[in-house]
């Protein structure tokens, strides 16, 4: 049986990486999907790919750092399908900064994408679900770094830790509305965005992911498709009543030391 038969899923940051992988799995599992992103090229290409395969997919151009655009993406989804049932917050900013060199502008950029955008997207989707008296679910793609992270991730960690707290707060607030909110603290994952980040900030060249993977317990970085399977499971009724969970989805064990 399909996990999301006839459901409508909005995926922010859904044009590449984990978001695009979620869109592919959600369509495979019977959902109609709307993906958002800043670049029409990749977004329209993904929607065309999924539609050509028999799915129902559309792209909405939106920079979620702009609250008005984030809200408009929810309205566009409802206009297209008459409703929205599930939200995945997959958009993320990973530019580097330490406690000592982060500027107010960089800090604000991280908060805008990694915390404020999920807040107001959830606000719009939850308002819609409550107005319908309908159940629904949200999955926030967070990061294992929200537990502390590397020194060069200071503004990223601050925003992602806030998102973990927000996930629990929203879940508690709307559990009696039958709206489930969960999060995934994902580990190091081989996405297009991570490749660009490694090259821009760490001077990485071709083959960096394979070299880095050899140092990890499982011998490789995580695959976005693996993350997507868990995200779609948490969206679906198959995950039962679980809400307010922020799951560590990583090959390193939090708190364990050699």
Image: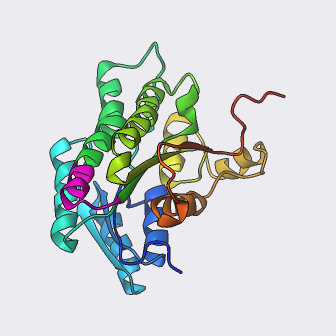
Q: Main secondary structure of the magenta part?
A: helix
Camera-side residue of 66 and 122:
122
Vertical order, 243 against 74 (above or below): above
**Residue 191: in magenta span:** no
Q: Residue at left 38%, top 81%?
A: 55
Q: Tell me if 64 is positioned left or right of 251 in this view.
A: left
**Residue 132: in magenta span:** yes
Location of the C terminus by quadrant is top right
Q: Residue at left 60%, top 61%?
A: 226
Q: Residue at left 72%, top 52%?
A: 220
Quadrant in which residue 9 is drawn: bottom left
Instruction: Tell me residue 84's x, y (percent).
Output: 27, 64
Instruction: Tell me residue 85's x, y (percent).
Output: 32, 63
Vertical order, 113 against 134 (above or below): above
Q: Tell me if 65 is positioned left or right of 196 in this view.
A: left
| Residue 89 visible in this rendered orientation of the protein | no
Q: Tell me if 204 is positioned left or right of 153 in this view.
A: right
Q: Residue furthest top?
A: 100
Vertical order, 251 against 79 (above or below): above
Query: The magenta stretch spans which residues?
Result: 124-135
Q: Residue furthest front?
A: 176
- Protein image colouring: rainbow
Instruction: Tell me residue 166's x, y (percent).
Output: 38, 35
Task: Give the mark count.
Answer: 0
Q: Residue at left 44%, top 72%?
A: 4
């Amino acid at each position: 049986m399909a996990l999301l038969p006839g459901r409508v899923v909005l995926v922010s940051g859904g044009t590449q990486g984990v978001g695009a992988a979620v869109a592919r799995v959600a369509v495979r599992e019977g959902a109609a999907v709307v993906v958002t992103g800043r670049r029409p090229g990749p977004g329209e290409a993904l929607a065309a790919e999924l539609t050509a395969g028999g799915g129902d997919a559309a792209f909405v151009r939106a920079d979620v750092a702009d609250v008005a655009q984030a809200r408009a993406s929810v309205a566009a989804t409802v206009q297209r399908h008459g409703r929205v049932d599930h939200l995945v917050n997959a958009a993320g900013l990973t530019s580097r900064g330490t406690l000592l060199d982060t500027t107010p502008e960089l800090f604000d950029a991280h908060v805008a994408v990694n915390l404020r955008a999920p807040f107001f997207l959830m606000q719009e989707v939850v308002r819609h679900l409550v107005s319908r008296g309908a159940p629904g679910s949200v999955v926030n793609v967070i990061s294992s770094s929200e537990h502390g992270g590397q020194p060069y991730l200071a503004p990223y960690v601050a925003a992602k830790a806030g998102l973990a707290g927000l996930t629990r707060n929203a879940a508690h607030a709307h559990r009696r509305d039958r709206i489930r909110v969960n999060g995934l603290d994902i580990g190091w994952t081989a996405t297009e965005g991570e490749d660009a980040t490694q090259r821009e900030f760490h001077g990485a060249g071709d083959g960096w992911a394979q070299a880095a993977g050899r140092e990890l317990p499982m011998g490789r970085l995580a695959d976005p498709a693996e993350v997507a399977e868990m995200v779609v499971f948490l969206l679906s009724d198959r995950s039962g009543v679980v809400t307010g969970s922020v799951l560590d989805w990583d090959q390193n064990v939090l708190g364990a030391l050699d």
